[in-house]
Amino acid sequence: MNTVEFQAIYVMWLRQTKRFIRARSRLIGNIVQPFFFLAIMGFGFNTARFASIPLNYSYIDFLSPGIIAMAVLFSSMFAGISVLWDKQFGFLQEVLVAPVSRLSIVIGRTLGGATTALIQGVFVLIISFVLGVKFSLNGLLQGLIFMVLIAFFSVGFGLIIASRMEDIHGFQLIMNLLIFPMFFLSSAFFPIKDLPNWLKALTYINPLTYGVDGLRGSLIGISYFPLLLDLTLTFLFAAATMIVGSYSFKKSEA
């Protein structure tokens, strides 16, 4: 890869980051929604007891890693929306005819989308800490790694869908149709151990499950699967969606 392509990656990353910073309504909305989930569901179900949640942890402790993952997941969706937006306004066509590889463009957009998603996740992490969630400081770095992998997975997933669509509204409907079941089946709200067998089976085949479980194990020390398994599978799913998403983007017509 030559210097010009590194510059292209930086420019695409910077553009995505600037769009995020300037869109204050998007930033506020993506923070307020997780806050309400934490405040209402976390404190509302705080007196409820689940057999697989240790007695020294409350429900909001269990819930907070799932809400952090939600913030990262939904923020990453905008990477796909931005592709469709740039298609409609002709910016993507101008970029694709530039003397740089499409792979450089994909990497730049992906890094931009993952960066903004990670920022959102860190904001929710801070809010959770303020609300009294008992995080393990020793697992904070590992938790950030899981957040990055979840961001790359969801950005790649968004690119796969966006490369096959032209309508922004249709993209949002399709993504909601896919993302919401994936999120609700990720053990974000309920311990896997307490689920019926048929629901456990759906949870096991959900790629997001291992990211949420690993994030929870890193931040509060409660995990259903071994952390090494969570990390390995989350990395493989993120790599797979990134490869397929990059290929789909390179083959798509602006």
Image (tube, rainbow, N blue to C red):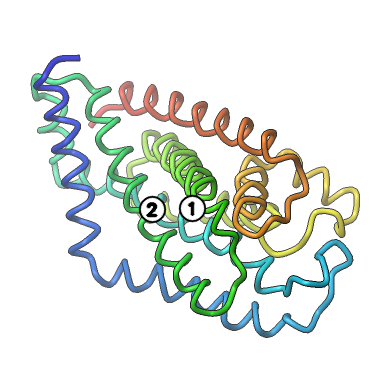
- Using the image, determine if residue 121 lies above or below residue 115: below
Question: What residue appears at the point 81 percent right and 79 percent down from the top-left corner?
Answer: 48
Residue in front for this viewpoint, 144 or 192: 144
Disc 2 element = helix
Instruction: Please state which amino acid type lies under the numbered disc 1.
Output: Leu
Q: Which structural element holds mark 1?
A: helix
Q: Please name the residue that numbered disc 2 is placed on.
A: 117
User: In the shown orientation, is residue 65 left or right of residue 51?
Assistant: left
Percent x, y of residue 117: 38, 53
* Structural crowding at the residue carrying mark 1, measured as other residues with C-alpha within 10 Å and reported as few (<14), some (14–19) or many (≥20): many
Classify 95 as above or below 138. above
User: Horizontal placement of 170 versus 188: left or right?
Assistant: left
The quadrant in which the N terminus is found is top left
Residue at 24 percent of width and 70 percent of height? 24
Q: Are marks 2 and 1 in contact (CB under 8 Å)?
A: yes
- In the rendered structure, which amino acid carries the disc numbered 2? Ala
Cα distance in 3D space between marks 2 and 1: 7 Å
* Disc 1 target residue: 73
Which residue is at 14% across, 15% downward?
Answer: 2
Q: Which is nearer the eye, 159 or 113? A: 113
The location of residue 177, given as percent across then percent down, is 56, 53
Relative to 148, say whether 28 is above or below: below
Q: Residue at x 23, y 30 (%)?
A: 105
